Structures are given as C-alpha cells and as structure tokens.
Amino acid sequence: MNRFQPFWFDDAMSAEGREVRASLTKNITADVCIVGGGYTGLWTAIKLREKSPDLDIVIIDKALCGQGASGRNGGCMLTFSSKFRTLAENVGIAEAIRLVKASESAVMAIDDFCQQQGIDAEVRVHGALYTATNKAQQAILQQPLAVLQQQDINHWARLNSAKLAHFSGSSHHLAGIFTPYGGSVHPGKLVRGLAQVAQKMGIKIFENTAMLGFRSPGRVLIDTPRGCISAGTLILATNAWTPQLIPQFKRAVVLVSSDMMITDVQPNTHNNPWFSQGTAVADSRLFVHYYRNSQSGRIMLGKGGNYFSYANRMVPLFDQASRFEPMLSKAFADFFPDADATIARSWTGASDRSVNGLPFFGHLPHQPNVLYGFGYSGNGVVQSFLGGEFLSSMALRLNDEWTRSGMAGGVKQFFPPEPICTLGARVIRRSVLRKEKCEDEGRTAFWLDKKLAKLAVSAGKADK
C-alpha cells in the first residue's frame, strides 16, 4: 500500500484491520471479469449476482479495492435532478425523467443495502443543499428547477434564512435550495464494505492484480503479472484510468483534480445541531466548493477544477496531499470562521469529466463482450449505483430499461485533441476564477471572461 492515503480510505482500512486480499497467481476462467474494485465494479458485480445467481464473477484491482476515486471522494450523495436539461438533451425527456427518479431512488437504495448487509458506511440521508454565496450565484440558483417543475418531478425547495443556516451550518450563504434526496456517506467504509459483501456472495476478488492487457478473439483473455483470466465478458470499471488503458478514449474525458481537506474532530459538536445531520452542501460556482460534516465530528471541504492533466496522464499529484491547501483553508475560513481549522489531512483525486458532465456506458467497437462505464464528472457516489444497473444488464444482454437507455450508447462527444484541449482548459479555468472573484467582490466581470466561462458550464453540478 502506498505511504500516502486519503483520509477516508485510511480510516476505513484502520477500522477493517488493514486486511489485504490475495493476488491472482494462476490462470483461471470466469463468466465475467471486472477490472476495477471501486463503486462501479463492485455494484456491477453485486447486481450481476442478484440478476444471475449462477454466474462465475471475478474482480481484479491493481491496488486495493477502493484505493482509487471510490475511497477518496467527498462522500456527497447527489442525484441527476440538477442536470435534467442536459440529460433531456442527450437521452430524451422521457428517459431523463426516468434517470432522475432512478437516481433519487438510488440514494434510498444505498442506505437500505448498507442496513440490510450490515455495512457501517455512516450513510446519512439528510438531503442535499445547493447555495448562493454572492448575488451573481443568487440569480442562477433556481434555474434548474423550472424544467423539473414542468415535468412534475421537482423535489427542491427554496429555504428561508433560518433553515438555510440550519442545513448548511454556515452564515456565509445568501440563499439555498434543498432536496431530501441526498446526503453523505463515509466513502472508504462504503467501498470496503461492498467488497466484503461481494465476497460473501461468492464473487472472487484479487487485489494487487493489475491488468496488463487483454485480447478478445472470442472469449476475452485478460493478462495479469502472474496469471491469465479467460472470461466470457470483460467489464472495464476503471474510471480515470480508462484513457490510459484504451487509447480511443483519450479524448472522451479530461482528468482534473478535485482537492479536499478534513479537519480534526471539532470541539463541542453535541451543542451544534448541524453535526447531527449529514446534508451535502455545494455552492453555485462552476468549480464548486462542496462540504459536509462527518459522523465523527469533522468537517470535510473540497473544491473541483484545480489541476488539468495534460493528455489525461495519471500524474503523481493525483495521489498526494493537495498542493491547493492554502486555497482550501481560505474557503474553509469563509464558510466556518469560528471553527477549528486544523487540517488533519488533505488529498487530491482525479475526476473524469465528460463533455456534458454525464457518465456513459457502452462496449468497444466490434467487441460486444468488452464493456465500459466512466465519465461520472465528480458525481459518482450515487450514479455508480446506477452504473451497476447499466453494466450488469448489458453484460447479460438483457432487453430492459438500462440497455435501451441513450446513456448506454457509449461515448458520443469528445474533447479537442492535445495540446488544444489542456491549453484551452487552463485558459478557461483562469477566466472562470477571474469572473468568480469579481462576483465575490460585487464587481462586473470582464466580457471575455464571461464568454470563456460559458464554455465550462457543463462542469457544474447544476445546469446553468
């Protein structure tokens, strides 16, 4: 295990006793081989077992289950509802409605699954809160709600100042909209718990077993350092690592850091009602601030859109303490001026941002038995549960709502080639930061910065 670990994963491993599963050391066969032991891979395996109990399923992970994005995200449970317009443009109105409802149901289903299986993932379904911290954000805060209301699927409501302070735990917000379909989870304990449940269901898991390559002359042959797996179907649940594994996906996403910090345990949390709830909170910036508290009395705060990786390389920065700690500390002081701001740990993760901010699921051209799913764009805790539905139904060749969905049609939009992509992303990022600084200060942003910032609207957690 690497020396540096994000807080959530390290905390989960300590609670688990730091058990490491065996590596693959011989040639084996399976009906389905899943590469990647994070949320997507584990939910897919579990759904496959539920839908087809006799399948022989194998999961391999190059490190430990959950050591990637699943063990280092913010643990915010958010749905598709704030991206309804984008959904409708890409999959049609009827399917967008279904996916919004499915994502809201998934919040509850994750909680139910953890309770039924005894996973102590600290799931707290206490809603999600999107806020405005300046007048410019106030003007756009409620924009996603109109289309939801038109389709009679809106569960968001504007909060008065008292409820806003209650659900946010901060006086920094000017306005907020709240939905009960959301909350927070301990991401490390969730992913490690899913792995334990998968094993109990008879799913074989091999850790520290990297896929070196694969061939599909019929059955898929997956090469690893010490053994080969012959599988009827291969599922790539490798998220941010996918562009490195499959060159044709190099322009399907851009890898951008999401940086997080978590405090020491706060004093006197029993006197603060905010710590009794696990609401996920996000402001209305394009490169959003998001935060939540933990069941143990800590405060986690993160910000996306910080470092764009050239050619989607998985650079060491993505597995280190955040280089943006000063920026995170300043944001923390704005939201919580009276809190203990001692940073227990900071970390960084690679977010696989798609062109439209939505995930996609499909199979490789002319290889229907090689499936993939990624592009969660920083919203994978809930959406990966749905990813398990998509990929399991696709692997079983079912004709159901998941395989018929437009989201199961693979990658349809691509970013420009390098060096244009990264250079453009960095120029746009600077324009966004200048624009949002002006808005914070009550000034009008430069015309060019406003125009360039519009090119990044799909990166936001809500349609603008």
Image (cartoon, helix red, strand yellow):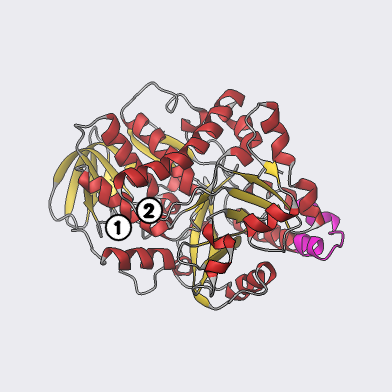
Q: Look at the image and tell me in which quarter the N terminus lies.
A: bottom left
- Looking at the image, is mark 1 or mark 2 earlier in the sequence? 1
Predominant secondary structure, magenta span: helix
Separation of marks 1 and 2 at Cα, in angstroms:
19 Å
Question: With respect to residue 86, does 329 lie above or below?
Answer: below
Question: With respect to residue 13, does 387 lie above or below?
Answer: above
Give the residue at mark 1: 62
Q: In this view, does 298 lie to the left or right of 218?
A: right
Taking depth in this image into account, of 419 and 398 the one nearest to the observer is 398
Taking depth in this image into account, of 229 and 126 the one nearest to the observer is 126
Q: Is residue 417 magenta?
A: no
Magenta extent: 434-452
Question: With respect to residue 273, does 248 lie above or below?
Answer: above
Residue 374 visible? The answer is no
Give the residue at mark 2: 190
Residue 27 visible? The answer is yes
Report the number of discs: 2
- Residue type of the residue flagged with mark 2: Leu
Q: Residue 355: x percent and y percent?
A: 59, 44
User: Which residue lies most toward the front here?
Assistant: 271
Which secondary structure, mark 2?
helix
